[in-house]
Amino acid sequence: MSEFDLIVIGSGPGGYRAAVLAKLRGLSVAIIEKADWGGCCLNRGCVPKKDWHHTAHLVAASKNYAKRGIHGNLTADITIAWRHQKDTVQVVRDSYLDYMKRLGIASFKGTGSFVDAHKISIDGQTTLHGKHIVIATGSSAYIPDVFPIVPDKILTTDNLFDSVPPRGRRVAVIGSGVIGTEFAFILAMLGKRITWITQSKPLSKSSYSKPALKLLSNAMERHKIVPHTGSRTKSVDLTGPGVTLNLDDGSEINVDWVLLGTGRIPHTEGLNLASAGVTTDTKGFVKVNEYLQSDIPHIYAIGDVANHHMSANHALADAAVVVSNILSPQSRKQQNKAVPQLVYSALELGIIGISEDEAEDEGLEAGVGFASFEGNPRALGQDEQEGFVRLIADMDSGALLGAEVIGSEAGELIHLIAQQFGQEDALNRFASTFYNHPARAEEILNATETLAAKWGLSEQVFGK
Ligand SMILES: Cc1cc2nc3c(=O)[nH]c(=O)nc-3n(C[C@H](O)[C@H](O)[C@H](O)COP(=O)(O)OP(=O)(O)OC[C@H]3O[C@@H](n4cnc5c(N)ncnc54)[C@H](O)[C@@H]3O)c2cc1C
Ligand SMILES: NC(=O)c1ccc[n+]([C@@H]2O[C@H](COP(=O)([O-])OP(=O)(O)OC[C@H]3O[C@@H](n4cnc5c(N)ncnc54)[C@H](O)[C@@H]3O)[C@@H](O)[C@H]2O)c1
């Protein structure tokens, strides 16, 4: 039986990152994957989604081209867009596999299943012994009972990217969470006519501020993407050529196909957790402590299978925490608040830390530094002025509690904030950095300076 310092089950962002980091830190590592290397994020999530989002963004931006003297009506061909994301995914997957090979990580294809707390069987054929084990088996789409999954008619993002999307133009997107909000926009820009059916307002369960959600809703409306809110699908009729959704408000929606964005559930099927003594909570997440240890201290769980945030960013952060804890037991706690979260829709929305409402709940008095992209020269030159930077600071200590970056390139700009997040003097670091001009990032400086000018945090911003 082969023995390893660490066995990782699942090769998504969590598992892959844990394996790479552990190997770079000198451990012997095996990784097991039962499906496509790279997990949901690479094959059916973040990577193909962002590839398509870029195409969608180009189509949306082209509506402003005429005033720059660029003429012509641009449209996207979803079949070619589908091929583009496939090529992107393939290049990334090859580079992951190549890197794992070069590092000397032992990779095994098959379903990993616990034999006991140290032994993992792969498809009942090979057994590995691990001093430490990381469960990184991710999640799968939650499908409400009313929806049967029927190829080319009712899809989730778990099968949307496998083959060219169905030809029909009329698409219903169900759900107002991140997936619904992202794909209603992306598919509309890729040429589909979207009916967006949601129980609640888009992203209403998120921590984004009212001004952020208002800007998003304005941007969606401009593209004629308006949610049909407050409706639940009562029944589904598949007898005709398309799909008929009967809603509980009495209305009937006829479309060619449906995309569900109705949540995801942790994936533990086939792992045989009981034989290792590992337990799950009522929602099926592997139970972990703040060091990401399961009930069995040398067995850790990371990413979607254990972290309720269910984002690649959190899976990657968990991986770093776990490798530190394997090398030096209980040395590093999970850091969910320091992890940026993004939504890629008609606007990019980025958030980190806590909102002012959450600060208030914690008994803190929050000041808000605000700067808009409206007058930003770079944003004006790009015709991308929508959005802003908001910094939430503790009025007593001047500590940075949270931030929001809304608008174009939020997914990149948020890193400037993430890098300083948790530093006592984060505001002073923003204020004393030298910036490229003109640049969108300068609004981080402007938002910081409003904390000095309007909220009296001059000393924390400019120093003594
Ligand atoms: C459409 C979509 C878009 C998304 N976009 C973003 C985004 O822009 N940004 C972001 O941060 N997050 C995004 N996410 C979320 C992100 O994809 C997940 O949070 C992330 O993939 C979780 O990583 P993970 O490593 O925990 O698991 P996964 O990526 O789900 O990987 C788990 C792997 O484990 C394997 N596995 C499961 N059981 C076993 C077993 N018994 N043996 C062997 N292998 C097994 C699976 O086959 C899978 O490959 C998106 C998700 C979706 C669905
Ligand atoms: N950019 C990102 O980081 C990113 C992108 C995509 C997905 N994800 C993650 O993937 C996970 C899944 O995303 P999601 O948007 O599917 O989940 P979600 O939990 O964010 O939203 C689920 C939506 O489905 C609706 N819903 C639930 N049951 C329903 C039913 N029976 N009928 C109609 N609607 C119903 C809910 O009201 C909600 O609007 C999330 O945790 C998300 O964080 C992250």
Image (cartoon, rainbow, N blue to C red):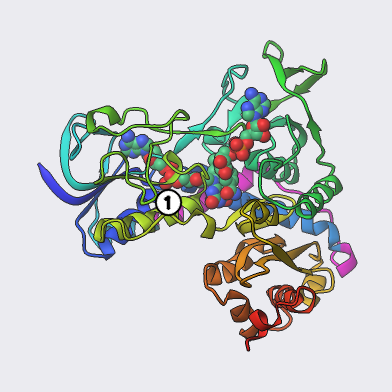
What secondary structure is the magenta-colored segment mainly? Answer: helix
| The N terminus sits in image quarter | top left
| Bounds of the magenta segment | 66-94
Residue 230, above or below 419 = above
Between 41 and 297, which is closer to the camera in this rendering? 297
Give the quadrant of residue 285.
top left
Between 346 and 6, which is closer to the camera in this rendering? 6
The amino acid pointed to by label 1 is: Pro
| The C terminus sits in image quarter | bottom right
Q: Position of residue 139 (x, y in %)?
A: 46, 36
Q: Of helix, strand and loop, which one carries label 1?
A: helix
Give the quadrant of residue 364.
bottom right
Query: How many tags in the picture?
Result: 1
Q: Which residue is mark 1?
A: 13
Is the residue at mark 1 in contact range of ligand 1, meaning its CB lies under 8 Å from it? yes
Magenta segment includes 85: yes
